[in-house]
Image: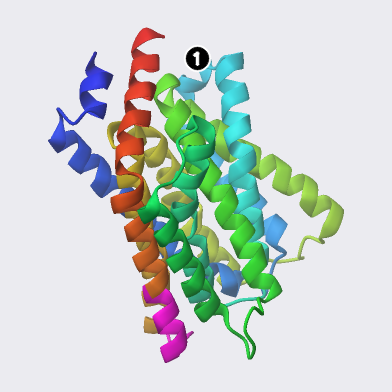
Amino acid sequence: MERIKIMTGHFPKRQLRADLALLFVAFSWGLTFVVVQDALSGIGPYYFVALRFLLALVFLAALYWRHLLNINRTTLKTGFLIGLFLFGGYAFQTIGLQYTGPATAGFITGLAVVLVPLFSALAYRRWPGLFLITGVLCAAFGLALLTLQGSIFKLGMGDLLIFLCAICFGLHIIMVGRYAGKHDPVLLAIIQIGTVSIISFLFALKFETMPNHLTTPVWTAFLITAIPATSLAFLIQNTVQRYTSPTHTAIIFTMEPVFAAITAHLLGREVLTLVQGAGCIFILAGMLVAELKGESQAADNIGSEIAQSSATK
């Protein structure tokens, strides 16, 4: 019964705390684009992701080792499945950052929050309304402006890779929202992170060569990404997403590309042109229109279904 009350808004303070925690997650992710791009000059993308998530795994396992005693086959399978989407997101994002700028990558990654209601519509057979369609078209137009390179409809390889990353992250949000309330969030986070590390190592052994030594930018990136932006971020998401609606989660995550753009600008890495700036505005407008107007009712219905299934489990 408590979960049903939480999902239907009887605990606004808990939802507020959850939203603030998710805002920290978006902030930590937004800060990583520049440092990851710097690190990739000294290490391959698969090795970077593998080691980043390995460090995060060791941190969580050492801190919450008692939870590992309660692991079961169902949680293991669920965590592995969610981890596959997480691996796809980070693999495409890290490789894509080799071919596009951090601010651009941040905004394209943010399209995941527009894809979430589309995936929800397919999963729960609730088709998008006018506001949602308007938001998607608005964001797509913004993406075209942001990534324009001399001719209309031209997208760079890095931009396409980052868009695939956005698809994977959108599916990851859906999966976490569906299963987070049914499993130990600590175990779910540990299994997801471990899955990403293992698969990344397999790809790295096949396609990359481990550098003889790790440069300062690589160690700096590990310091920033491994614990705050990986272990803590996914632990927080798996823990608190059950206490807030998918709509709130999606809206909050629109701040990630904003933080990425601000970071890139403050560090002097990117100066957005007027056209690109307009593209950013259209993307953010599309996200907010889609989330605030297009999915609010569906999100409430989905949340109620999740709560009821959790309460009867």
- Residue at figure coordinates x 44%, y 53% from the top left: 113
Q: Is residue 93 magenta?
A: no
Q: Which residues are magenta?
A: 267-281
Point out residue 75 in the picture as x, y percentages from the top left corner: 55, 20
Q: Is residue 153 above or below residue 24?
A: below
Q: Is residue 25 above or below residue 147?
A: above
- Residue at figure coordinates x 69%, y 62% from the top left: 45
Residue highlighted by disc 1: 70
Q: Is residue 11 above or below residue 174?
A: above
Question: Which quadrant would the C terminus be assigned to in this image?
Answer: top left
Colour setting: rainbow
Question: Which quadrant would the N terminus be assigned to in this image?
Answer: top left
Label 1: which secondary element: helix
- Residue at figure coordinates x 33%, y 44% from the top left: 247
Q: Is residue 271 magenta?
A: yes
What amino acid is labelled 1 in the image?
Asn
Which one is nearer the viewer's eye here, 205 or 273? 273
Which one is nearer the viewer's eye here, 78 or 198? 78
- Residue at figure coordinates x 71%, y 56% from the top left: 46
